[in-house]
Image (cartoon, rainbow, N blue to C red):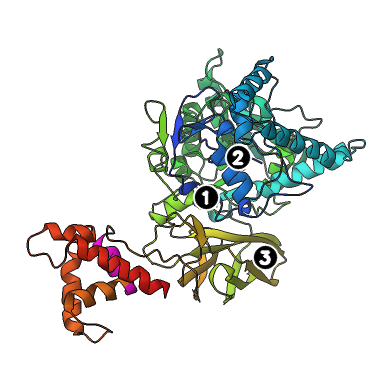
Amino acid sequence: MRCGRESRRSAGTGQTGISSPSSPLEAEQDVPRIYSNDSPARRPATGQDCPPAEPAYNKLNGFHAAQDPWLLTQVLRNEWGFDGVVVSDWGAVTDLAAALAAGLDLEMPASNGIGPREVLAGLDAGLVSPGDVDAAVERLRVLGERTADKVSGPADYAAHDRLARRAAVQSMVLLKNDGGVLPFSAQRRLVVIGELARTPRYQGSGSSRVNPVRLSTPWNALAARVPGARFTAGYALEEGGGTDGDALAAEAVAAAADGDQVVVFLGLPDSAETEGADRVSLDLPETQLRLLSSLAAVREDLAVVLFNGSAVTTPWALQVPAVLEGWLGGQGCGEAVADILLGDVNPSGKLAETFPLSIEDTPAFGNFPGEDGEVRYGEGLLVGYRWYDTRQMPVAFPFGHGLSYTSFDYTGLEATAEGTGTGAAVRVCVTVTNTGGRAGAEVVQLYVGGPPNGVPRPAQELRGFSRVELDPGESTRVTFDLAAGSLDRFDPGTRSWVTDSGAYLLKVGSSSRDIRLSEMIEVEGSGPSPLPTASSPVNQWLADPRAARVLLESLTGSSGGNGDPAAAASLSAALSLMGSLPLDRLGRFPGAPLGAEQAARLARELAEGAAD
């Protein structure tokens, strides 16, 4: 388990460089608000199957993640209830004594004796206590006990391969299928273009690389199922190397013109997407894009399969009717691609990230890579799809998107709420029907929008999803139970979890932009009610009903709500013109209705009244 801020959720980093000196700057209140509110992390991470946690290389708000007591002890252990082992990323420790004091348990790899010397020096200096060392040893001992009885038998490679193939096929996402170009027919002449069909990128680079016992490639899988299928490379995976790119492209165009159905494999080479470096572009390689344009000039029915580890820009998708996102599909990727292209399996994957129109649209643009060794997370709470949806930005393909060879209808949305405050629980039910002509699976998604009470928050957030498999004409009732705490938000003022009172908009659909049904429910919350003080802005006084009554009654000379409503409304409107000004600063303006002493008195009256 990693806790933090990138796609891998490493604690405190959005970068991949081991030696990067950058220190991400992120408001402390945003860390729990982003990572806990819709994450299993808020539930205690304990027990036999609790995996180790791993802090990242970078600093967070000026502190190395591997030796930050706020991150590793206060948040991870105390607030999230994590009781497992914290092990460093390789080379992420700069001072083992400080890391142990912060809550780290194990430095990786061995440090050539440097770490032990730092611990001894830290003990002498009082930087780390014997209790810190004992606690780390105890957690490692418990981990040993938890894992000691896990005896492995002989590997069942055939079962592993079947699992890999099933995982790949269920992860692939049909982004586009205009005119029902897919699935292909095994009885028609098939042309397969693209070196990635023969040499697929099926795994990441760097420390994630493994040597599979079995590996299927798309070309081999398709050739075995489609008699007479033809392959042409079309391009070289890496630029240079003496390959005649023009000749490869010309051969591919000629082959495409002669086939009944054509699939083009595109994607990113290892050099464009690897551990230890950040991508420099969201675009596909230029040689592949030129090839696709040439192919589209002779074929209007192209299907494209992508192999890439994360989102790419897709302006070229306007040239083709069908696009299948294959990701890095593992050892079973070849058979999985063939399963979907030939219709043996109905695609059901959904995007776990938004595909933007351009890199300039992304949340980090303008803040990353930062300057002077610092990177500011300027998007705040609007991480990922929240950024695009809240700002109502057009995107290429939205979060949660994924098509099928069949169709699904949503009916009968019902929502109920029980309990109050942080104990409020919500049940949402909807009926999903397969209205198409073949069996398929749909991933039903539930999004929730909070009450419009002025609290900064995303427009909607995913709160649940459920995969259902349905035969043609079959219906099923899908239920989402949002347990107590699911609607909570972290309040930075009180540093506590609260549930706001008000109307919540519940939406179910097939993606964050394909909402089929919605319903409003009222929730009686336990939102914080920090009282305005003398130095609070005037508009904060006016927004709080209790404070507004105390303020207006004092200024109009009325009490008990017996004043002139029109006069109170007029005064409130006048005061709102100075809404951003602290109440106790009004007295500095000539003719002001109150001064600093009166503001302090009103604040005391308000606090005393609330306490009664």
User: Residue 610 in the image: x percent, y percent?
Assistant: 39, 72
Crowding at mark 1 (Cα within 10 Å: few <14, some 14-19, many 20+)? many
Residue under circle 3? 437
Identify which amino acid the numbered label 3 is placed on: Gly
| Helix, strand or loop for disc 2 | strand
Q: Earlier in the sequence, mark 3 or mark 1?
A: 1
Check disc 1 and report the residue beneath it: 32
The question of residue 212 being in magenta is answered with: no
Q: Nearer the viewer, residue 166 or 106?
A: 106
Residue under the point 76% across and 49% down: 47
The amino acid type, in three-letter code, at marker 2 is Val
Seen from this angle, which residue lies furthest right? 154
Magenta residues, start to end: 537-546
- Residue 582 visible in the snapshot: yes
- Check the picture and name the quadrant holding the N terminus: top right
State the image quarter where residue 358 is shown: top left
Q: In the visual, does 115 lie left or right of 272?
A: right
Q: Nearer the viewer, residue 557 or 567?
A: 557
| Nearer to me, 251 or 475 | 475
Q: Looking at the picture, which amino acid does disc 1 mark?
A: Pro
Mark 2 sits on what residue?
263
